[in-house]
Amino acid sequence: MPLPAVLRLLLTFLAITAGLSGATLPAAAGTLRAGLSDDLTTIDPFAFPGLVSSGVLRQVYEGFTAFDAAGNTVPALATRWETPDGGRTWRFALRPDARFHSGRLFTAADVLWTWEHHLTRKPQPGYSAFYLRGVEGAAALRQGSSTTLAGVEISDPHTLVVRLTEPDALFPLYPFLFVDRGMEGEHGPAWHERASGGTGPFRLMSWQRGESVRLEAHAAYWGGAPTVDAVSLAVLPDTNTLLARYDAGDLDVATLPDNAVRTVVRQPRYDGQIKAFARAQVRYLALNQDLYPPFRDRRVREAVGLALDRVATVNGLHAGRAALTNGFVTPGLGGYQPDAVPLPPGDPDRAKALLAEAGHDGGRGLPPLQIAGGPNVREEATYFAAQLTAVLGIPVGVRIQERAAFVAAINEGQEALFINGWTADFPDPIDQLATQWHSASPTNRTHWRNPGFDRLMERARGLADPVARNALYREAEALLRDQAVAVPLATPQFVALVRPGVTGVVIRPDGTTDYHSARLP
Protein backbone atom coordinates (compact mmCIF):
# COMPACT_ATOMS: atom_id res chain seq x y z
CA MET A 1 0.00 0.00 0.00
CA PRO A 2 1.45 3.44 -0.87
CA LEU A 3 2.68 5.43 2.09
CA PRO A 4 0.12 8.30 1.71
CA ALA A 5 -2.77 5.83 1.93
CA VAL A 6 -1.27 4.31 5.09
CA LEU A 7 -0.93 7.74 6.63
CA ARG A 8 -4.51 8.62 5.75
CA LEU A 9 -5.80 5.46 7.40
CA LEU A 10 -3.63 6.08 10.47
CA LEU A 11 -4.82 9.66 10.81
CA THR A 12 -8.43 8.56 10.42
CA PHE A 13 -8.01 5.93 13.15
CA LEU A 14 -6.36 8.40 15.50
CA ALA A 15 -9.08 10.97 14.88
CA ILE A 16 -11.81 8.45 15.67
CA THR A 17 -10.19 7.16 18.83
CA ALA A 18 -9.24 10.62 20.03
CA GLY A 19 -12.73 11.96 19.39
CA LEU A 20 -14.57 9.06 20.99
CA SER A 21 -12.36 9.30 24.06
CA GLY A 22 -13.26 12.94 24.55
CA ALA A 23 -10.36 14.82 22.91
CA THR A 24 -11.21 17.98 20.98
CA LEU A 25 -10.76 17.84 17.23
CA PRO A 26 -9.54 20.92 15.38
CA ALA A 27 -12.12 22.73 13.26
CA ALA A 28 -11.79 22.31 9.51
CA ALA A 29 -12.10 25.27 7.16
CA GLY A 30 -15.14 23.81 5.46
CA THR A 31 -17.03 22.71 8.56
CA LEU A 32 -20.78 23.28 8.67
CA ARG A 33 -21.96 23.83 12.25
CA ALA A 34 -25.41 22.71 13.37
CA GLY A 35 -27.24 21.79 16.54
CA LEU A 36 -28.82 18.60 17.87
CA SER A 37 -31.97 18.82 19.98
CA ASP A 38 -30.72 16.05 22.25
CA ASP A 39 -27.82 13.70 22.73
CA LEU A 40 -27.64 10.50 20.77
CA THR A 41 -29.01 7.38 22.44
CA THR A 42 -26.63 5.14 20.48
CA ILE A 43 -24.16 5.02 17.60
CA ASP A 44 -24.69 1.29 17.17
CA PRO A 45 -26.46 0.72 13.81
CA PHE A 46 -27.96 -2.52 15.16
CA ALA A 47 -29.73 -0.85 18.11
CA PHE A 48 -33.04 1.01 18.02
CA PRO A 49 -31.82 4.58 17.44
CA GLY A 50 -34.69 6.98 18.10
CA LEU A 51 -35.17 10.08 15.95
CA VAL A 52 -32.03 12.03 16.90
CA SER A 53 -29.61 9.12 16.59
CA SER A 54 -31.31 7.96 13.40
CA GLY A 55 -30.78 11.36 11.79
CA VAL A 56 -27.05 11.06 12.44
CA LEU A 57 -26.66 7.38 11.60
CA ARG A 58 -28.34 7.88 8.22
CA GLN A 59 -25.52 10.23 7.26
CA VAL A 60 -23.18 7.30 7.88
CA TYR A 61 -25.08 4.14 6.88
CA GLU A 62 -27.38 3.35 3.96
CA GLY A 63 -29.89 0.73 2.83
CA PHE A 64 -31.25 -0.50 -0.49
CA THR A 65 -33.36 2.65 -0.89
CA ALA A 66 -33.76 6.10 0.66
CA PHE A 67 -36.13 9.06 0.97
CA ASP A 68 -35.60 12.04 -1.29
CA ALA A 69 -36.51 15.58 -0.24
CA ALA A 70 -40.08 15.13 -1.50
CA GLY A 71 -40.60 11.89 0.39
CA ASN A 72 -40.25 9.57 -2.60
CA THR A 73 -38.34 6.31 -2.69
CA VAL A 74 -35.04 6.54 -4.57
CA PRO A 75 -32.24 3.99 -5.13
CA ALA A 76 -29.40 3.97 -2.64
CA LEU A 77 -27.19 0.85 -2.37
CA ALA A 78 -29.48 -1.07 -4.73
CA THR A 79 -29.64 0.23 -8.29
CA ARG A 80 -32.69 -1.87 -9.11
CA TRP A 81 -34.92 -4.54 -7.59
CA GLU A 82 -37.43 -6.90 -9.13
CA THR A 83 -39.75 -9.72 -8.14
CA PRO A 84 -40.91 -12.51 -10.49
CA ASP A 85 -43.66 -13.79 -8.18
CA GLY A 86 -45.54 -10.90 -6.60
CA GLY A 87 -43.10 -10.18 -3.79
CA ARG A 88 -42.16 -13.62 -2.49
CA THR A 89 -38.75 -13.54 -4.14
CA TRP A 90 -36.68 -10.38 -4.58
CA ARG A 91 -33.60 -9.92 -6.73
CA PHE A 92 -31.41 -6.91 -5.94
CA ALA A 93 -28.71 -5.44 -8.16
CA LEU A 94 -26.27 -3.72 -5.84
CA ARG A 95 -24.30 -0.61 -6.60
CA PRO A 96 -20.86 -1.71 -7.85
CA ASP A 97 -19.09 1.56 -7.01
CA ALA A 98 -20.09 1.93 -3.35
CA ARG A 99 -17.24 1.85 -0.86
CA PHE A 100 -17.26 1.67 2.90
CA HIS A 101 -15.42 4.26 4.95
CA SER A 102 -12.68 1.67 5.41
CA GLY A 103 -12.11 1.74 1.64
CA ARG A 104 -13.53 -1.76 1.10
CA LEU A 105 -16.09 -2.29 -1.65
CA PHE A 106 -19.70 -2.88 -0.57
CA THR A 107 -20.90 -6.34 -1.64
CA ALA A 108 -23.78 -8.75 -1.13
CA ALA A 109 -21.77 -10.48 1.59
CA ASP A 110 -22.07 -7.31 3.69
CA VAL A 111 -25.85 -7.39 3.31
CA LEU A 112 -26.01 -11.00 4.47
CA TRP A 113 -23.62 -10.38 7.40
CA THR A 114 -25.68 -7.37 8.52
CA TRP A 115 -28.92 -9.33 8.44
CA GLU A 116 -27.48 -12.35 10.24
CA HIS A 117 -26.08 -10.07 12.92
CA HIS A 118 -29.50 -8.46 13.47
CA LEU A 119 -31.10 -11.87 13.91
CA THR A 120 -28.45 -13.34 16.23
CA ARG A 121 -27.72 -10.24 18.31
CA LYS A 122 -27.94 -10.76 22.09
CA PRO A 123 -29.58 -10.15 24.48
CA GLN A 124 -32.09 -8.55 22.08
CA PRO A 125 -32.27 -8.98 18.30
CA GLY A 126 -31.21 -6.02 16.21
CA TYR A 127 -33.60 -3.28 15.18
CA SER A 128 -34.13 -4.69 11.67
CA ALA A 129 -34.99 -8.22 12.87
CA PHE A 130 -38.67 -7.25 12.72
CA TYR A 131 -38.36 -6.51 8.98
CA LEU A 132 -36.46 -9.76 8.40
CA ARG A 133 -38.99 -12.05 10.06
CA GLY A 134 -40.40 -13.18 6.70
CA VAL A 135 -37.05 -14.25 5.21
CA GLU A 136 -36.74 -18.03 4.85
CA GLY A 137 -34.60 -19.34 7.68
CA ALA A 138 -34.87 -16.20 9.85
CA ALA A 139 -36.73 -17.98 12.66
CA ALA A 140 -34.28 -20.90 12.66
CA LEU A 141 -31.32 -18.52 12.82
CA ARG A 142 -32.85 -16.56 15.72
CA GLN A 143 -33.63 -19.77 17.61
CA GLY A 144 -30.13 -21.15 17.10
CA SER A 145 -31.17 -24.21 15.07
CA SER A 146 -29.32 -22.81 12.05
CA THR A 147 -26.12 -20.85 11.66
CA THR A 148 -26.95 -19.22 8.32
CA LEU A 149 -29.84 -17.30 6.79
CA ALA A 150 -31.10 -19.90 4.32
CA GLY A 151 -33.34 -17.56 2.29
CA VAL A 152 -30.50 -15.43 0.95
CA GLU A 153 -28.56 -16.43 -2.15
CA ILE A 154 -25.51 -14.56 -3.43
CA SER A 155 -24.92 -15.26 -7.10
CA ASP A 156 -22.12 -12.71 -7.48
CA PRO A 157 -20.69 -9.89 -5.35
CA HIS A 158 -23.34 -7.43 -6.54
CA THR A 159 -26.41 -9.63 -6.95
CA LEU A 160 -28.57 -10.82 -4.10
CA VAL A 161 -31.70 -13.01 -4.18
CA VAL A 162 -33.98 -13.08 -1.13
CA ARG A 163 -36.67 -15.73 -0.66
CA LEU A 164 -39.54 -14.95 1.71
CA THR A 165 -42.04 -17.25 3.37
CA GLU A 166 -44.86 -15.10 2.03
CA PRO A 167 -45.12 -12.13 -0.34
CA ASP A 168 -43.84 -8.80 0.94
CA ALA A 169 -44.28 -5.98 -1.55
CA LEU A 170 -42.48 -3.51 0.70
CA PHE A 171 -39.28 -5.42 1.39
CA PRO A 172 -37.04 -3.15 -0.77
CA LEU A 173 -38.23 -0.10 1.18
CA TYR A 174 -37.33 -1.26 4.68
CA PRO A 175 -34.79 0.91 6.54
CA PHE A 176 -31.85 -1.48 6.57
CA LEU A 177 -28.49 0.08 7.42
CA PHE A 178 -25.76 -2.05 5.91
CA VAL A 179 -22.50 -2.44 7.79
CA ASP A 180 -18.94 -3.24 6.76
CA ARG A 181 -18.59 -6.90 7.76
CA GLY A 182 -14.90 -6.41 8.46
CA MET A 183 -15.50 -4.02 11.37
CA GLU A 184 -16.11 -6.56 14.12
CA GLY A 185 -13.12 -8.67 13.17
CA GLU A 186 -10.81 -5.67 13.16
CA HIS A 187 -12.12 -3.73 16.14
CA GLY A 188 -14.08 -6.20 18.27
CA PRO A 189 -17.73 -6.27 19.38
CA ALA A 190 -17.71 -2.55 20.29
CA TRP A 191 -16.33 -1.63 16.86
CA HIS A 192 -18.89 1.19 16.43
CA GLU A 193 -17.14 3.08 19.24
CA ARG A 194 -13.83 2.90 17.38
CA ALA A 195 -14.57 3.07 13.66
CA SER A 196 -17.08 4.21 11.07
CA GLY A 197 -18.61 1.22 9.28
CA GLY A 198 -20.97 2.66 6.65
CA THR A 199 -21.04 3.74 3.02
CA GLY A 200 -22.80 7.08 3.56
CA PRO A 201 -21.66 10.55 2.51
CA PHE A 202 -20.15 11.19 5.96
CA ARG A 203 -18.06 9.08 8.29
CA LEU A 204 -18.60 9.25 12.04
CA MET A 205 -15.43 10.65 13.54
CA SER A 206 -16.40 11.38 17.14
CA TRP A 207 -19.19 11.36 19.66
CA GLN A 208 -18.54 13.23 22.87
CA ARG A 209 -21.50 12.23 25.02
CA GLY A 210 -23.75 15.12 25.90
CA GLU A 211 -21.58 17.56 23.95
CA SER A 212 -21.05 16.98 20.24
CA VAL A 213 -20.86 14.74 17.19
CA ARG A 214 -18.41 15.20 14.35
CA LEU A 215 -18.92 13.90 10.82
CA GLU A 216 -16.31 14.13 8.07
CA ALA A 217 -16.86 13.91 4.33
CA HIS A 218 -16.48 10.52 2.66
CA ALA A 219 -14.43 11.51 -0.37
CA ALA A 220 -15.13 8.19 -2.13
CA TYR A 221 -18.89 8.41 -1.71
CA TRP A 222 -20.68 6.83 -4.68
CA GLY A 223 -22.95 9.88 -5.02
CA GLY A 224 -20.02 12.28 -5.13
CA ALA A 225 -18.06 13.77 -2.26
CA PRO A 226 -19.97 16.23 -0.04
CA THR A 227 -19.25 19.90 -0.67
CA VAL A 228 -18.35 20.62 2.95
CA ASP A 229 -15.36 19.01 4.60
CA ALA A 230 -17.17 18.19 7.82
CA VAL A 231 -20.29 18.69 9.90
CA SER A 232 -19.99 19.59 13.58
CA LEU A 233 -23.14 18.90 15.60
CA ALA A 234 -23.44 20.47 19.04
CA VAL A 235 -25.84 18.89 21.54
CA LEU A 236 -28.03 21.83 22.52
CA PRO A 237 -31.29 20.68 24.17
CA ASP A 238 -31.89 24.10 25.75
CA THR A 239 -33.62 26.44 23.29
CA ASN A 240 -32.14 29.61 24.79
CA THR A 241 -28.64 28.23 24.41
CA LEU A 242 -29.38 27.10 20.84
CA LEU A 243 -30.59 30.56 19.84
CA ALA A 244 -27.75 32.30 21.65
CA ARG A 245 -25.22 30.18 19.77
CA TYR A 246 -26.96 30.89 16.47
CA ASP A 247 -27.21 34.63 17.16
CA ALA A 248 -23.51 34.70 18.07
CA GLY A 249 -22.60 33.19 14.69
CA ASP A 250 -21.51 29.86 16.18
CA LEU A 251 -24.08 27.83 14.22
CA ASP A 252 -24.93 27.74 10.54
CA VAL A 253 -28.11 25.69 11.00
CA ALA A 254 -30.36 25.57 14.07
CA THR A 255 -33.25 23.13 13.85
CA LEU A 256 -35.87 24.42 16.25
CA PRO A 257 -37.54 22.33 18.95
CA ASP A 258 -41.26 22.11 18.34
CA ASN A 259 -42.03 24.16 21.43
CA ALA A 260 -39.83 27.05 20.25
CA VAL A 261 -41.22 27.52 16.75
CA ARG A 262 -44.11 29.84 17.58
CA THR A 263 -41.80 32.25 19.41
CA VAL A 264 -38.96 32.28 16.88
CA VAL A 265 -41.00 32.62 13.69
CA ARG A 266 -42.59 35.83 14.99
CA GLN A 267 -39.27 37.60 15.59
CA PRO A 268 -38.36 40.06 12.81
CA ARG A 269 -34.63 39.50 13.24
CA TYR A 270 -35.02 36.04 11.73
CA ASP A 271 -36.80 37.19 8.58
CA GLY A 272 -35.47 35.33 5.57
CA GLN A 273 -33.68 32.73 7.72
CA ILE A 274 -36.59 30.41 8.51
CA LYS A 275 -36.92 27.22 6.49
CA ALA A 276 -39.81 24.76 6.92
CA PHE A 277 -40.01 21.17 5.71
CA ALA A 278 -42.79 18.58 5.67
CA ARG A 279 -42.60 15.94 8.38
CA ALA A 280 -43.76 12.36 7.78
CA GLN A 281 -44.65 11.80 11.41
CA VAL A 282 -47.69 10.55 13.25
CA ARG A 283 -48.13 11.78 16.84
CA TYR A 284 -50.57 10.67 19.49
CA LEU A 285 -51.41 10.61 23.18
CA ALA A 286 -50.84 6.95 24.02
CA LEU A 287 -53.00 5.00 26.47
CA ASN A 288 -51.37 1.91 28.02
CA GLN A 289 -54.22 -0.41 28.98
CA ASP A 290 -51.89 -2.88 30.69
CA LEU A 291 -50.49 -0.31 33.08
CA TYR A 292 -53.68 1.68 33.81
CA PRO A 293 -56.67 -0.72 34.11
CA PRO A 294 -59.39 1.98 33.67
CA PHE A 295 -58.12 2.43 30.07
CA ARG A 296 -59.42 -1.08 29.32
CA ASP A 297 -62.89 0.47 29.16
CA ARG A 298 -63.38 2.01 25.74
CA ARG A 299 -65.60 4.71 27.20
CA VAL A 300 -62.76 5.97 29.38
CA ARG A 301 -60.39 6.05 26.39
CA GLU A 302 -62.90 7.91 24.25
CA ALA A 303 -63.57 10.38 27.07
CA VAL A 304 -59.87 11.28 27.18
CA GLY A 305 -59.92 12.23 23.49
CA LEU A 306 -63.14 14.23 23.72
CA ALA A 307 -61.88 16.17 26.73
CA LEU A 308 -59.02 17.68 24.70
CA ASP A 309 -59.17 20.69 22.38
CA ARG A 310 -56.57 19.51 19.88
CA VAL A 311 -57.50 22.07 17.22
CA ALA A 312 -56.32 24.90 19.47
CA THR A 313 -52.80 23.48 19.55
CA VAL A 314 -52.22 24.05 15.82
CA ASN A 315 -52.08 27.83 16.16
CA GLY A 316 -51.59 28.13 19.92
CA LEU A 317 -48.56 25.86 20.22
CA HIS A 318 -47.29 25.50 16.63
CA ALA A 319 -47.98 28.94 15.09
CA GLY A 320 -49.99 27.29 12.33
CA ARG A 321 -47.01 25.20 11.18
CA ALA A 322 -48.65 21.84 11.89
CA ALA A 323 -51.22 19.44 10.43
CA LEU A 324 -53.95 17.83 12.51
CA THR A 325 -55.63 14.63 11.36
CA ASN A 326 -58.10 12.18 12.83
CA GLY A 327 -56.02 9.18 11.97
CA PHE A 328 -52.75 7.37 12.34
CA VAL A 329 -51.19 7.97 8.91
CA THR A 330 -49.29 11.16 8.23
CA PRO A 331 -50.13 13.57 5.36
CA GLY A 332 -47.97 12.86 2.33
CA LEU A 333 -48.00 9.06 2.54
CA GLY A 334 -49.95 6.92 0.13
CA GLY A 335 -52.79 5.92 2.43
CA TYR A 336 -53.58 9.32 3.87
CA GLN A 337 -57.22 10.36 3.39
CA PRO A 338 -57.65 13.91 4.73
CA ASP A 339 -61.43 14.01 4.34
CA ALA A 340 -62.28 10.39 5.08
CA VAL A 341 -63.30 10.95 8.73
CA PRO A 342 -63.64 14.51 10.01
CA LEU A 343 -61.82 15.39 13.19
CA PRO A 344 -64.34 15.54 16.04
CA PRO A 345 -64.14 18.74 18.06
CA GLY A 346 -63.52 18.60 21.77
CA ASP A 347 -66.77 17.78 23.55
CA PRO A 348 -66.40 18.15 27.33
CA ASP A 349 -70.05 17.32 28.03
CA ARG A 350 -69.89 14.09 26.04
CA ALA A 351 -66.56 13.24 27.71
CA LYS A 352 -68.10 13.66 31.18
CA ALA A 353 -71.11 11.55 30.23
CA LEU A 354 -68.94 8.71 28.94
CA LEU A 355 -66.90 8.74 32.11
CA ALA A 356 -70.07 8.60 34.20
CA GLU A 357 -71.37 5.67 32.12
CA ALA A 358 -68.12 3.86 32.91
CA GLY A 359 -68.78 4.35 36.63
CA HIS A 360 -66.35 7.22 37.18
CA ASP A 361 -68.60 10.28 37.43
CA GLY A 362 -66.42 13.35 38.04
CA GLY A 363 -63.32 11.14 37.96
CA ARG A 364 -64.45 9.12 40.96
CA GLY A 365 -62.32 6.04 41.55
CA LEU A 366 -59.71 6.88 38.91
CA PRO A 367 -56.10 6.78 40.10
CA PRO A 368 -53.94 9.85 39.40
CA LEU A 369 -52.12 10.02 36.09
CA GLN A 370 -49.11 11.76 34.64
CA ILE A 371 -48.57 12.61 30.99
CA ALA A 372 -45.00 11.56 30.21
CA GLY A 373 -42.88 12.94 27.42
CA GLY A 374 -39.55 14.34 26.33
CA PRO A 375 -38.50 17.97 26.85
CA ASN A 376 -39.99 19.11 23.52
CA VAL A 377 -43.59 18.35 24.61
CA ARG A 378 -43.58 20.07 28.00
CA GLU A 379 -46.07 22.80 27.07
CA GLU A 380 -48.32 20.46 25.12
CA ALA A 381 -48.39 17.95 27.97
CA THR A 382 -49.10 20.70 30.49
CA TYR A 383 -51.99 21.97 28.37
CA PHE A 384 -53.54 18.53 28.00
CA ALA A 385 -53.05 17.67 31.68
CA ALA A 386 -54.92 20.82 32.72
CA GLN A 387 -57.79 19.99 30.36
CA LEU A 388 -58.11 16.40 31.56
CA THR A 389 -58.13 17.52 35.18
CA ALA A 390 -60.68 20.27 34.56
CA VAL A 391 -63.05 18.28 32.34
CA LEU A 392 -62.83 14.75 33.72
CA GLY A 393 -61.81 15.38 37.30
CA ILE A 394 -58.85 13.02 37.05
CA PRO A 395 -55.74 14.29 38.85
CA VAL A 396 -53.30 14.53 35.92
CA GLY A 397 -49.76 15.83 36.23
CA VAL A 398 -46.78 16.01 33.87
CA ARG A 399 -43.55 14.01 33.92
CA ILE A 400 -40.87 15.33 31.56
CA GLN A 401 -37.75 13.20 31.13
CA GLU A 402 -34.59 13.47 29.12
CA ARG A 403 -35.26 11.84 25.78
CA ALA A 404 -33.10 8.73 26.32
CA ALA A 405 -34.75 8.03 29.67
CA PHE A 406 -38.22 8.63 28.24
CA VAL A 407 -37.64 6.29 25.27
CA ALA A 408 -36.30 3.61 27.62
CA ALA A 409 -39.35 3.98 29.87
CA ILE A 410 -41.94 3.63 27.11
CA ASN A 411 -40.00 0.78 25.48
CA GLU A 412 -40.24 -1.08 28.80
CA GLY A 413 -43.94 -0.31 29.19
CA GLN A 414 -43.47 1.88 32.26
CA GLU A 415 -45.71 4.80 31.26
CA ALA A 416 -49.52 4.72 31.29
CA LEU A 417 -50.16 8.01 29.45
CA PHE A 418 -47.56 9.58 27.19
CA ILE A 419 -47.05 11.67 24.07
CA ASN A 420 -45.41 9.56 21.40
CA GLY A 421 -44.51 10.03 17.76
CA TRP A 422 -43.20 7.95 14.90
CA THR A 423 -41.45 9.45 11.91
CA ALA A 424 -41.68 7.25 8.83
CA ASP A 425 -38.56 5.26 7.98
CA PHE A 426 -39.89 4.57 4.49
CA PRO A 427 -42.70 6.13 2.44
CA ASP A 428 -45.56 3.72 2.97
CA PRO A 429 -48.30 3.92 5.63
CA ILE A 430 -47.51 0.46 6.97
CA ASP A 431 -44.45 1.98 8.62
CA GLN A 432 -46.68 4.17 10.78
CA LEU A 433 -49.35 1.56 11.36
CA ALA A 434 -47.54 -1.74 11.85
CA THR A 435 -44.61 -0.28 13.80
CA GLN A 436 -46.93 1.28 16.38
CA TRP A 437 -49.81 -1.19 16.62
CA HIS A 438 -48.84 -4.64 15.32
CA SER A 439 -48.62 -7.01 18.27
CA ALA A 440 -45.17 -8.28 17.17
CA SER A 441 -43.62 -4.83 16.71
CA PRO A 442 -40.84 -3.92 19.16
CA THR A 443 -42.06 -0.30 19.02
CA ASN A 444 -45.68 -1.07 19.97
CA ARG A 445 -45.27 0.91 23.16
CA THR A 446 -48.89 0.79 24.33
CA HIS A 447 -48.83 -3.03 24.18
CA TRP A 448 -52.24 -2.95 22.47
CA ARG A 449 -52.95 -6.20 20.65
CA ASN A 450 -55.63 -7.01 18.13
CA PRO A 451 -55.44 -10.11 15.87
CA GLY A 452 -57.71 -8.45 13.30
CA PHE A 453 -55.37 -5.48 12.99
CA ASP A 454 -52.36 -7.81 12.68
CA ARG A 455 -54.08 -9.68 9.84
CA LEU A 456 -54.77 -6.43 7.98
CA MET A 457 -51.11 -5.48 8.19
CA GLU A 458 -49.92 -8.89 7.00
CA ARG A 459 -52.36 -8.82 4.08
CA ALA A 460 -51.28 -5.31 3.10
CA ARG A 461 -47.63 -6.29 3.24
CA GLY A 462 -48.22 -8.89 0.54
CA LEU A 463 -50.12 -6.67 -1.92
CA ALA A 464 -48.12 -5.15 -4.76
CA ASP A 465 -51.06 -2.94 -5.82
CA PRO A 466 -50.85 0.31 -3.78
CA VAL A 467 -54.57 1.01 -4.27
CA ALA A 468 -55.47 -2.34 -2.70
CA ARG A 469 -52.93 -1.77 0.10
CA ASN A 470 -54.35 1.67 0.86
CA ALA A 471 -57.85 0.21 1.19
CA LEU A 472 -56.55 -2.10 3.92
CA TYR A 473 -54.75 0.79 5.60
CA ARG A 474 -58.01 2.75 5.76
CA GLU A 475 -59.70 -0.28 7.29
CA ALA A 476 -56.90 -0.55 9.84
CA GLU A 477 -57.19 3.14 10.74
CA ALA A 478 -60.96 2.74 11.17
CA LEU A 479 -60.29 -0.09 13.62
CA LEU A 480 -57.85 2.06 15.60
CA ARG A 481 -60.38 4.90 15.74
CA ASP A 482 -63.22 2.57 16.71
CA GLN A 483 -61.14 1.11 19.53
CA ALA A 484 -59.96 4.59 20.62
CA VAL A 485 -56.49 3.15 21.16
CA ALA A 486 -54.87 6.60 21.28
CA VAL A 487 -55.61 10.27 20.63
CA PRO A 488 -54.15 11.63 17.34
CA LEU A 489 -52.26 14.90 17.84
CA ALA A 490 -51.02 17.69 15.57
CA THR A 491 -47.85 16.99 13.56
CA PRO A 492 -45.59 20.05 13.29
CA GLN A 493 -43.33 20.82 10.37
CA PHE A 494 -39.58 20.65 10.72
CA VAL A 495 -38.48 24.27 11.11
CA ALA A 496 -34.88 25.47 11.07
CA LEU A 497 -32.93 28.71 11.11
CA VAL A 498 -30.37 28.74 8.28
CA ARG A 499 -27.70 31.42 8.16
CA PRO A 500 -27.77 33.67 5.08
CA GLY A 501 -25.49 32.32 2.38
CA VAL A 502 -25.76 28.70 3.53
CA THR A 503 -27.53 26.68 0.84
CA GLY A 504 -28.42 23.09 0.05
CA VAL A 505 -29.44 22.02 3.56
CA VAL A 506 -32.64 19.96 3.43
CA ILE A 507 -34.56 18.16 6.16
CA ARG A 508 -36.12 15.10 4.56
CA PRO A 509 -39.58 13.93 5.65
CA ASP A 510 -37.99 11.14 7.72
CA GLY A 511 -36.21 13.74 9.87
CA THR A 512 -32.73 13.27 8.41
CA THR A 513 -30.99 16.56 7.70
CA ASP A 514 -29.28 16.09 4.35
CA TYR A 515 -25.90 17.82 4.40
CA HIS A 516 -24.55 16.19 1.24
CA SER A 517 -25.26 19.20 -0.98
CA ALA A 518 -24.78 21.86 1.70
CA ARG A 519 -22.63 24.85 0.77
CA LEU A 520 -21.09 27.45 3.02
CA PRO A 521 -20.87 31.12 2.00
Image (cartoon, helix red, strand yellow):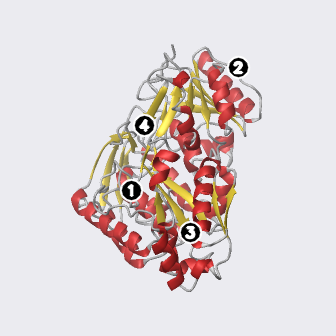
**Residue 482 locus on image (x, y percent):** 39, 74
Question: Mark 4 and mark 1: span between their CA atoms?
Answer: 18 Å
Location of mark 1 (residue)? 325
Q: Residues within 10 Å of mark 1 (few under 14, many from 20)?
A: many
Location of mark 3 (residue)? 391
Question: Mark 2 and mark 3: span between their CA atoms?
Answer: 56 Å
- Mark 2 residue element: loop
- When the figure is inspected, residue 309 is found, relative to residue 500, above or below; the finding is below
Q: Residues within 10 Å of mark 4 (few under 14, many from 20)?
A: some
Q: Earlier in the sequence, mark 4 or mark 2?
A: 2
Q: Indicate which disc residue 277 carries.
A: 4
- Drawn side of residue 350 relative to residue 190, left or right: left
Q: Nearer the viewer, mark 1 or mark 2?
A: 1
- When the figure is inspected, residue 283 is found, relative to residue 99, above or below; the finding is below
Residue 167 visible, this orientation: no
- Drawn side of residue 476 relative to residue 57, left or right: left
